[in-house]
Image (spheres, helix red, strand yellow):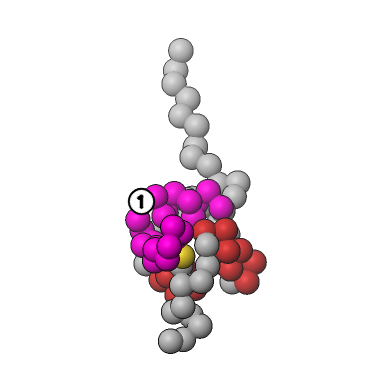
Amino acid sequence: MDDMDTPVLTEDELWEYLHHDEGLPVTRRTIKHVVIRREIVPTRLGNSNYFSKRDGLQWVESGCATPPFGIRGARRPTVRRPG
């Protein structure tokens, strides 16, 4: 099994890999919500969720990680109502 396919990363370690090693602008909160919505399906080992590096990269390549979701500083425009 390749190192890219071995599920040894926790949510925080997956964020560190994507953010620091790959230089992608994702936040910890993004990874948390992606796992909750099962866009990245974890491997259950014991009582914990583990992810492979390839899981994270495939999620980015799938198009689910597009701006403004997960980009720091990017916010929805404020709608101003008259009156």
Query: Observer-nearest residue: 42 or 44?
Result: 44
Q: Secondary structure at mark 1?
A: loop
Left/right of residue 42 with respect to residue 4 in the rendered view: left
Residue 29 appears in the rendering: yes
77 up-or-down from 31: above or below: above
**What segment is highlighted magenta in the picture?**
28-49
Residue 65 appears in the rendering: no
Query: Observer-nearest residue: 21 or 52?
Result: 52
| Residue placed under numbered mark 1 in the picture | 37
Query: Observer-nearest residue: 64 or 15?
Result: 15
Image quadrant where residue 15 sits: bottom right
Residue 1 in magenta?
no
Q: Residue at x 58, y 68 (%)?
A: 17
Image quadrant where residue 42 sits: bottom left
Mark 1 surroundings: few (<14), some (14-19) or many (≥20) residues within 10 A: few
28 up-or-down from 63: above or below: above
Pick the quarter of the image with the N terminus.
Answer: bottom left
Type of amino acid under label 1: Arg
Farthest residue, direction bottom: 1
Q: Residue at x 46, y 65 (%)?
A: 50
Q: Position of residue 29 (x, y in %)?
A: 53, 48
Q: Residue at x 35, y 56 (%)?
A: 38
Q: Position of residue 45 (x, y in %)?
A: 42, 66
Q: Position of residue 31 (x, y in %)?
A: 49, 55
Q: Residue at x 44, y 49 (%)?
A: 33
Query: Observer-nearest residue: 22 or 43?
Result: 43
Left/right of residue 52 with respect to residue 62 in the rendered view: right
Residue 46 in magenta?
yes
